[in-house]
């Protein structure tokens, strides 16, 4: 087959794909121009499905928070741990590792609590805002 024919086929495919993707993006986005002529294109996000998704995610995080809090409670240094630390060779190493694990879990619990608070604040903001609301969505 001729290279010119290949180029024409490839170019027509690229043009067709760009029209298709541009049309799809145009349907999902709202383009706005401010007084200075700066254009923004925000993806339209429905408020009700978004609040439902935030509620679901917050519930999952709260379950993880409860499980992690129980795990931290089990990791507390007990009388048996004290005996192991004093009696066994390498007991200080055991105590250091156990203490470090508990500290890491407490940090994870703090981060999880912050995420839950952030989601609760976002949910409150979405629910208390009447009417239409434009939301910028970050796709990762």
Image (cartoon, helix red, strand yellow):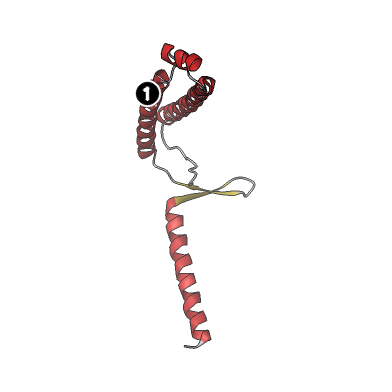
Rendered view: 29 above or below 60: below
- Tell me the residue at 48%/66% (across/down): 18
Can the viewer see residue 120 in this picture? yes
Write down the quadrant of residue 127 in the picture: top left
Q: Is residue 36 left or right of residue 97?
A: right
Q: Residues within 10 Å of mark 1 (few under 14, many from 20)?
A: few
Q: Position of residue 77 (x, y in %)?
A: 45, 16
- Tell me the residue at 47%/88% (across/down): 1
* Nearest the eye: 15 or 65: 65
Q: Position of residue 16 (x, y in %)?
A: 45, 70
* Nearest the eye: 15 or 55: 55
Can the viewer see residue 77 in this picture? no
Q: Position of residue 98 (x, y in %)?
A: 48, 23
Q: Residue furthest right?
A: 36
Q: Residue furthest bottom?
A: 2
Q: Residue furthest top?
A: 79
- Tell me the residue at 48%/43% (across/down): 137
Residue that label 1 marks: 66
- Secondary element at image label 1: helix
* Nearest the eye: 121 or 75: 75
* Nearest the eye: 37 or 10: 10
């Amino acid at each position: 087959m001729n290279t010119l024919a290949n180029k024409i086929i490839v170019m027509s495919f690229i043009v067709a794909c760009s029209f298709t993707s541009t049309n799809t993006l145009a349907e999902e986005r709202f383009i706005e121009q401010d007084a200075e002529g700066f254009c923004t294109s925000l993806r339209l996000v429905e408020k009700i499905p978004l609040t439902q998704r935030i509620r679901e995610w917050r519930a999952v995080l709260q379950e993880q928070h409860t499980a992690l809090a129980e795990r931290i409670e089990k990791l507390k240094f007990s009388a048996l741990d004290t005996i192991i630390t004093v009696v066994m060779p390498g007991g200080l190493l055991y105590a250091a590792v156990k203490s470090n694990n508990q500290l890491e879990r407490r940090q994870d619990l703090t981060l999880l609590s912050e995420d839950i608070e952030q989601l609760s604040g976002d949910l409150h903001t979405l629910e208390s805002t009447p009417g239409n609301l434009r939301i910028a969505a970050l796709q990762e």
